[in-house]
Amino acid sequence: MRNSKWMGAALASALLITVSAGSVGAAGTGSSTKVGAGHTAAAAAGPVKVKEGTAAWTVNGSPVSFSTIDSSGYKLYSLSQVAGEIGAKVILAQGGMELNDSKGLHTVLIKPGAKSFQVDGAAQEFTVAPVLYGGKVYVELTKLVTSLGGELEADSGAILSFARPEGAFDSLRWTADGSLIANKSDAELPVLLKFGTAAEGDYHVFSSDDNATELAVSPDQGWGAFSDETGLLHLINLSSGAIRALGTDNSVKTDLVWSADGKKIYFIQGDKQEKIAQISVDTGEVKTILADKVENKSELRISGDEKSAVYIVNVTGVAKNDADSTEDSLTVDYSKAGEQLYKLDLSAKEAKPAALTTSPDNKLYPEILAGGSVVYLSADAEGDAANTLKEIKADGTASNIAFDVEVNWAENVGSGLVVSGTTADGSTVIYSLDASGAKTELFRTAGDVSEIAVSKDGARLAVVSDGKLSVIQGGKALQLTK
Amino acid sequence: MKIFRKFTVTALTAVIAVSTAFAGIASAADTLKGKITINGSTALLPLTLQAAKEFQKLHPKVKIAASGKGSVTGPQAVKKGIADIGAVDWDASTDVPGFKAFEGQVANKVAVIPFATIVNKNVGVDNLTTEQLKGIFSGKIKNWKEVGGADADIVVITRAFGSGTRVNYQAKALDGGDIVKKEKNYKETGSSGDMKTAVATTPNAIGYIDLVYVSGDVKAVKFNGVEATTNNVINGSYKIWAYGYYMTKGQPEGITKEFIKYVQSSKFQQGSLKKLKFIPISAMK
C-alpha cells in the first residue's frame, strides 16, 4: 500500500476540519466501535455501531486483506488502502479527497459524510456515505473501484486496477514483444487495441486507422502490412503504431503474404484479382509474378523457400444471353462454379500454374507444408459429409488427414498445422499436428471459438471464445476482455 | 476472475514454430448449409466473390456460385428462378429508363459504385460538362475540338444495352440523355474490362467505367469540374455514382438472408469492400 503514513496524517487533518465544520458526528478513535455515521441524516440519528473487520480479495492477481468496517449494514472499505492497492493517488482537495488513477484517465472527488461524489466532473451517489472511522475514510468498494476505471468481480473476489474492455473482438495478431493486437469490431469506428498478455486490464488503443484492421504480420512480428481504399500499401510498426506508405502502386491488392525473410510482400493484384505480384519492402517496387488473365484469385500462400505459390481460383458460372439481353435467352450454368486450387512454380521462369483440384467441394484454408504438401479444408455443401482436411502430396497423391473432430479451421505455423474442430458434443478442440503427423491437443472449450491466433514461439494461443478474448499460456487462461 | 470456466488447456507445447495465425472461423454451432446462386452485374462480381470467400469461412458448408453478365441479367435470373440473388447497379424494383420494374423483387443495398468518364490518353481534354457529354454520346458533338481538344474525331465506346453502368451513366452523367448508335466511330462492349481495353487502345476514344477500373492506361476526366474520387462522391460534389443492389424474390430468407447480412455488415463494408474500391453504403448517410 502506498502513502499510508501520509494518508494517515492527511486524514487526521481532514477529521479535524470536518468536525469543526460540524457537518458530521465525532469520529471514533482507536478501537472504539462507535462512530458518527458520516453524513447529515445518519448524524442526526446519532452514533452508529461499527464493527471492524477485514476482507480478502485479489488485486491484479495478488491476494490482499482490506480493512473494513460494517456500517449501517454495509461493508465499507478503507479508501486509502484500496486506492493504494489499485495504484490511485489520493490528495486532499475541496474539503475531501481527490483520487486519480495511475493512467490519469479518471478523477474522483469524495467527501466523508456526503453520499454525492464526483467522477470526472459528473455527480454520482453512494448508497452509503463514506465514513470517517479511526482516522480513516471507509467507502463502498465497488463504486470506488469502478469510478477509478477498475473492474471488480464479487463472485471471485477479484479486482483489476483497470477494467478489461467489453465488446466484440476479431482479427487477432501477436506482436514481437508478446503483446496481442485485436480489432474491436463493434466499435462505431474501427479501432485496434493492444493488450499486454501478462495481466488483465493492460491495454491501450493502438491504432484508429480504419484500414489497419486486417493486418498481414511480418515473420518477425515487427510490422503489419495493409492496403487502403486507394490501393496503396502501408506498413505499421507493431511497436510504435507509426504508419508509412510502401510504394506508390494503387492497384487493388488483396491476400498480402510476407516472404519468410521479410523483404517482400506477395499479393493478389488487380480489380478482378487477376495477377500475382510482389512488392519490395525496401524500395516499394512492384514486380508481376503471374499475369495469366485468370480472374478471381485468392488465398495466396507462398512456401517458406519462396519456390512455390498456391492459391485458389474462384471459378464463376457461365451466363449466356442474346445481343438484346432478353430474359428468355438468359441461361446460367453453375456446374463448374466453385473454388479450385492451383500451384505455381516460382523457381522456373515462365512456369504455368498447375491445377491441383477439380472437385466441386468448398475449399478453404490452403496451406503449403514444409515437405511441399498442400493441405486444405474440404467442405461438402450439398451432401452430408463432414468437413475434412485433405492433403495433396508433392507427387500428386491425395488423402484425408484423420481427426476425431469436424475440422473448421487450419493454419500452417511453420513446423506443422494448427487445426480447430468441433466434437460430437459441440465442444471446440484445437490441435497441433507436427510434420510426422502426431497430434497434440492444445485447447478445449465447451464454448464457441470464433478467432484463433498462435504466438510466434508457439507457447501461447489467443482465442475469442463466446465473444471473450483470452490468452492461453503456461497451462492457464487469461481473459483479456469481458 | 473466472477465466477457467469452460476451458481445458491441455498442453500448449512449443511445437509451433512460426505463426501469424488469424481467422474468423466457423462456430461449433454453425448449421448453415446449402447453395446460393448469384448472377448479374460484372462490376459487383469481385465484391460478391470476396464476400463469398469470407462468408464460407464462417459457414464452410454454404456454396456460393456466382456469375456476371451485366446488370439486367441479375433480376432477370431471379425472375426466372435460376439465381437466388440478382446483382444489379440500379434499384430494379423500380422503373428506370429502358427497364421496367421487376415486380415482387426486393432491392437490398450492398455498395456504392462510383463511375468515371474515361478517355484515351492521347485526348487533351481534362473536363467535360453534362451538356458536352450529352452532345458527345448523342452524336451531335463529333470532334474533340468542339469541347476544347485537338482536331480529331471522337470515338464513342459504350456498354451494351442491359449494362447497369450504362443505365447509371445515362441517368447521372447524361442527365437522362440518349446514347445514339453511330455508323462509325462507335463501339459497344460487353464488360467493364472490355470497355477499359477499348478506350485504352483506341486513340481519341471516350467511354465510361466503374471508378475501380480506372488505372494508368486510361485517363479519367472531371465531370462539371469535379474530379472522380471516392471522397468527392461521399462529400456530394461528384454525381456519377449509384448504389449496387442484390435483388431477391421477396424478402431474403435462410442462407441468402445471412449472406446479404454479411455483405451489409460493418466488418465487410469497412474492410474488404473498401479495399476493392467500393464505397460503404453507410458513407452516403
Image (tube, coloured by chain):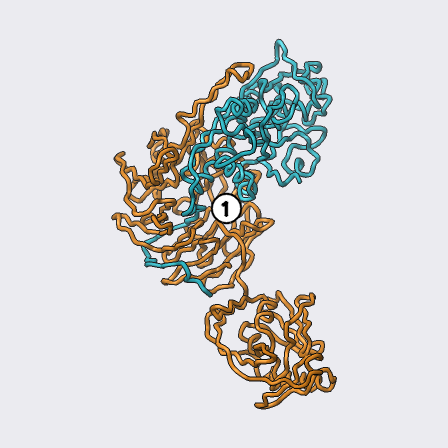
Instruction: Report if residue A17 is visible in the image.
Output: yes
Q: Tell me which corner region of the image, top left, top right, bottom left or bottom right, holds residue B221.
A: top right
Taking the view exactly as shown, the residue that stands out farthest to the top is B183
Instruction: Report if residue A341 is visible in the image.
Output: no
The residue drawn where x is 66% and y is 79% is A112
Q: Which residue is mark 1?
A: A214
Where residue A165 appears, x then y in whole percent? 54, 59
Q: Tell me which corner region of the image, top left, top right, bottom left or bottom right, holds residue A14.
A: bottom right
The residue drawn where x is 50% and y is 33% is B48
Whether residue A363 is situated above or below residue A76 in the rendered picture: above
User: In terms of depth relative to the viewer, which is nearer, A433 or A287?
Assistant: A433
Is A370 situated left or right of B107 in this image? left
Whether residue B230 is situated above or below residue B220 in the rendered picture: below
**Amino acid type, mark 1:** Glu
Chain letter of disc 1 in the image: A
Letter of the cyan chain: B
Where residue A236 appears, x then y in whole percent? 52, 50
Is A420 situated left or right of B276 in this image? left
Letter of the orange chain: A
Where residue B8 appears, x then y in whole percent? 36, 59
Is A27 situated left or right of A260 in this image? right
Circle 1 — which element? loop
Is A415 situated left or right of A333 in this image? left
